[in-house]
Image (cartoon, rainbow, N blue to C red):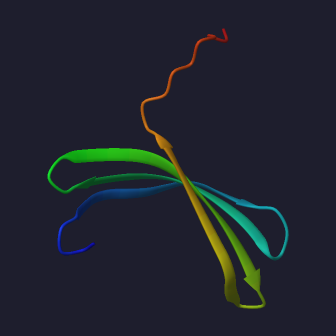
Amino acid sequence: MLLKQVVLEWKIKNIHQINDTLFFVEWYFKAKEEQLYSFDGISKIEFDGNKIRLIEEYEAKHETFRPCKID
């Protein structure tokens, strides 16, 4: 991937610690290949002692639609 992708930004927004072994990390990613693109993501990270046991990652479009406005 590094041969065709240039990472422009990868910002961690929040880190949520659920317990000693489970964390959720919210982040924003922006890169360029043939075109510029960006998305929001979240990683679920589980630890076993001081080692990572599992990482699951999800992405969502950065531009989101919010039909209800809360005042």
In this rendering, the answer to whether 12 lies above or below 23 is above
Nearer to us in this view, 10 or 61 = 61
Relative side of 38 to 8, left or right: right
| Figure label count | 0
Q: Position of residue 53 (x, y in %)?
A: 70, 84
- Residue 50 lies, with reference to residue 1, above or below; the image says below
Which quadrant of the figure contains the N terminus? Answer: bottom left
Closer to us: 14 or 33:
33
Residue at 43%, 56% (x, y): give it.
11
Q: Residue furthest bottom?
A: 50
Q: Residue at x 77, y 87 (%)?
A: 48
Q: Residue at x 24, y 74 (%)?
A: 2
**Residue 50 placement: quadrant:** bottom right
Q: Residue furthest left?
A: 34
Q: Residue at x 66, y 8 (%)?
A: 71
Report x, y in % for residue 43.
60, 61
Judged left or right of residue 19, residue 50 is left
Q: Is residue 65 above or below residue 32?
A: above
Quarter location, residue 20:
bottom right
Image quadrant assignment for residue 61: top left
The x and y percentages for residue 15 are 64, 59
